[in-house]
Image: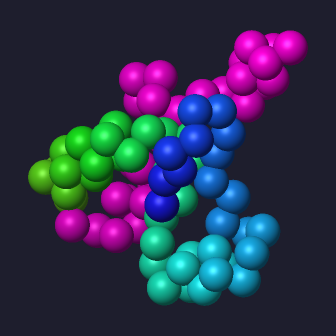
Amino acid sequence: MTSQCIYGEVNMHVYSTGRKLLTAGVISAGDMLPETAFVKLIWTLGQTDDLNEVKSVMQTNIAGEIQDKLSLKFFLI
């Protein structure tokens, strides 16, 4: 799950719909752009079919695709 907002990230715990999606197995991509998350998912699925590993890789910052919350906070000030 990604957002098309320029600044901010997906928080799947705020609304009941997000919590239902998490229960269904949807992976939160944080603040990754949708296009970046798509390419990363394709690459990840080419490496493994273990869903826990896919989730772990998708939520790991590999090449700066996920912003550090602290650096984003300073950027906005």
Q: How is the image coloured?
A: rainbow
Where is residue 57? Give x, y as percent.
Answer: 40, 48
Position above or below: 8 against 46:
above
In the rendered view of the protein, which quadrant contains the C terminus?
A: top right
Q: Which quadrant of the structure image shows residue 33?
A: top left
Relative depth, front residue between 14 and 41: 14
Image height of 55 relative to 73, above or below = below
Q: Camera-side residue: 73 or 60? A: 73
In this picture, residue 19 sits left or right of residue 38: right
Above or below residue 53? Residue 19 is below
The answer, for residue 44, to whether it is visible in the render is no
Please determine whether, in this image, residue 49 is positioned above or below residue 74.
below
Percent position of residue 52, x then y: 41, 67
- Compared across the picture, whether 8 is left or right of 43 comes to right
Residue that appears at 62% across and 54% down: 10
Q: Nearer the viewer, residue 16 or 70?
A: 16
Q: Residue at x 74, y 75 (%)?
A: 15
Q: Residue furthest left?
A: 46
Is residue 20 left or right of 76 when viewed as pictured? left
Query: Looking at the image, can residue 19 be seen?
Result: yes
- The x, y position of residue 46, in whole percent, is 13, 52
Q: Residue at x 69, y 58 (%)?
A: 11
| Residue numbers of the magenta segment | 49-77
